[in-house]
Image (spheres, rainbow, N blue to C red):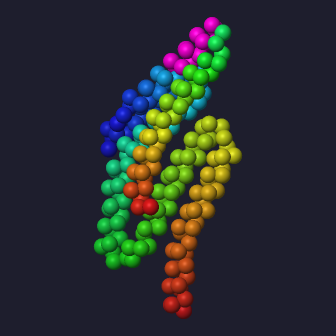
Amino acid sequence: MDVDLIFKIAAIGILVSILNIVLNKSGREEQAMMTTLAGLVVVLMLVVREIANLFDTVKALFGF
Amino acid sequence: MEAELIRIAGIGIVAAVLAVVVSEKKPEMAMLVGLAFGALALMLVAGKAGAVISLINDSVQKSGMDADLIVPVLKVTGMAYVTQFAVDACRDAGQNAIASKIEIAGKILMLAVAAPIATALIRIITTIL
């Protein structure tokens, strides 16, 4: 089981929030927003793949 | 079996702590942590569910029951799991309206799958009468 994925997502969340704070403090609000958005998209890609995997498994399991 | 449960329980606690830590600054990341944990935990037990389902299929075959009757039952069970997963994810994100729409869609589709069984039952009853 890929426990790493959970840690990875949490790490990306912490990293993005730190980047957000730093960029906000130095007065780059637009870039801060962009980093937030990029982090969200990256994590979403990871999670969506896993969910698609799960739904495929359920589909194969219950035969629909 | 017990090893998997202990593993899922431990990872669940760790994921909950991580989600709380992250949710302070980024609530959307906390939701994704929960979602990833859900997908991973269910994948871990999917193999066991497959064993149970093949057991059910075996019993049905041995009992000489019509195999077509058990297919919709399994199908509805799977659909219920998928619906519940999506609904819980939406509830976690605070989108109760979307969650209830998914719920309604799931119910309608499950009913559509289950309807042929009901008609089959009615047909059997009419042949008896």
Q: Quadrant of the N terminus of chain B?
A: top left
**Residue B5 place in picture, x, y as percent:** 37, 39
User: Residue at coordinates 42% horizontally, 35% vertically from top-left?
Assistant: B9
The answer to whether one can see residue B17 in this image is no
| Residue that sits furthest to the bottom in the current view | B129
Residue A15 forms part of the magenta stretch: yes
Q: Closest to the observer: B29 or B48? A: B29
Quarter location, residue B7: top left
Q: Position of residue B82 (x, y in %)?
A: 51, 51
Q: Please state the horizontal and vertical placement of residue B18, each as a whole percent of the image.
A: 49, 25
Q: Is residue A43 above or below residue B61?
A: above
The x and y percentages for residue B101 are: 66, 52
Name the residue nearer the viewer: B16 or A23: A23
Residue A26 placement, left or right of A64: right
> Can residue B43 be seen by looking at this rendering?
yes
Q: Is residue B22 above or below residue A28?
A: below
In this picture, is A31 found above or below B12? above
Q: Residue at x 56, y 18 (%)?
A: A17
Which residue is located at x 47 percent, y 22 percent? A11
Q: Is residue B120 magenta?
A: no
Identify whether B67 is placed above or below B50.
below
Q: Nearer the viewer, residue B89 or A16?
A: A16
What stretch of residues is rendered in magenta? Answer: A14-26
Q: Residue furthest top?
A: A26
Q: How many marks?
A: 0
Q: Residue at x 66, y 50 (%)?
A: B100
Magenta stretch: dominant secondary structure: helix
In terms of image quadrants, where is residue B69?
bottom left
Q: Quadrant of the C terminus of chain B?
A: bottom right
